[in-house]
Each structure stands twice: as C-alpha cells, then as structure tokens.
Amino acid sequence: MTSAFLRDALPGHDVKTVAQDGWAGVKNGELLKLAAELFDVLLTVDRSLEYQQSFFGLALAASVIEAPSNGVAVLRPLMPAVLEAMGASRPGVVTRVRA
C-alpha cells in the first residue's frame, strides 16, 4: 500500500506515513503521542493496536482496517467505509473497518 494511494483514496484528509514524518523506529506508545499532536485519526492495519496500546486520554482516534491483505486491490473497496469511520471517530476510541 502506498501513501499516494491513501492520499488519493481519502480526499480532504492529510495522509502521511510514519516514514514520511521521520518516525520510523519510534515505539508505539510514543508514536501515538506524536500522532495525537498532529492528527485527529490514526489509520492502521495493525489489528492488535488497541490491545497493545492505550488511547485513553489521547486526542487521537484510530481506525483499524481488517482485511485479508494490505494490497491496494483489497483495500480500495474499503475506502468508503474507512471515510465513514473516520468521519464518526472520537478521540480515544478505536473503530474497525472489516472487509
């Protein structure tokens, strides 16, 4: 999955990857704090994120995409549901978008 694909599939949203922001290698807890400073929603395919990290007290929501693969052909049809989930997101809450 490329960030260009995400930018095109999520119009009106500022889409960045961890690598683009220079956060590669940053541990999850610290990564969430950094993301909360700049973004409203974290979009991820990491299904275990909410079980490994606490979103309590963060001004950040998360949308987790659950799909059989991370391939563009699999994720593209899910983008309308992702946009809907992001629009209804609330800080500290993890929502799931399932294939």
Image (cartoon, helix red, strand yellow):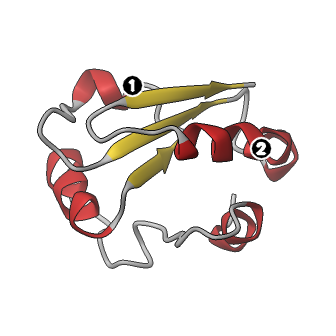
Image coordinates for residue 6, horizontal then vertical, percent: 68, 63
In front: 78, or 27? 78
Q: Would you call the spot at circle 1 few (<14 residues within 10 Å), some (14-19), or many (20 or more)?
A: few
User: Residue at the location (21% across, 66% down)?
Assistant: 37
Instruction: Give the x, y percent position of residue 35.
Output: 28, 61
3 w.r.t. 83: above or below: below
Residue 73: x %, y % from top left: 88, 47
Compute the Cα span from label 2 to label 1. 23 Å
Choose between 19 and 78: the one closer to the eye: 78
Under mark 2, the amino acid is Pro
Question: Is 84 placed above or below 42 here?
Answer: above
Give the image location of residue 15, x and y in percent: 54, 69
- Measuring 17% from the left and 56% from the top, which residue is drawn there? 33
Label 2 secondary element: helix
Classify residue 58 as left or right of residue 23. left
Which tag is nearer the camera, tag 2 or tag 1? Answer: 2
Earlier sequence position, callout 2 versus callout 1: 1
- Residue annotated with mark 1: 48
Q: Residue at x 69, y 61 (%)?
A: 10
Please give left or right for residue 58 compared with residue 92 in the image: left
Point 23% across, 47% down: residue: 28
Q: Quadrant of the C terminus?
A: top right
Look at the numbered discs 2 and 1 and tell me whether their residues touch, using CB distance below 8 Å: no
Name the amino acid, label 1: Ser
Task: Identify residue for label 2.
Answer: 80
Residue 12 placement: quadrant: bottom right
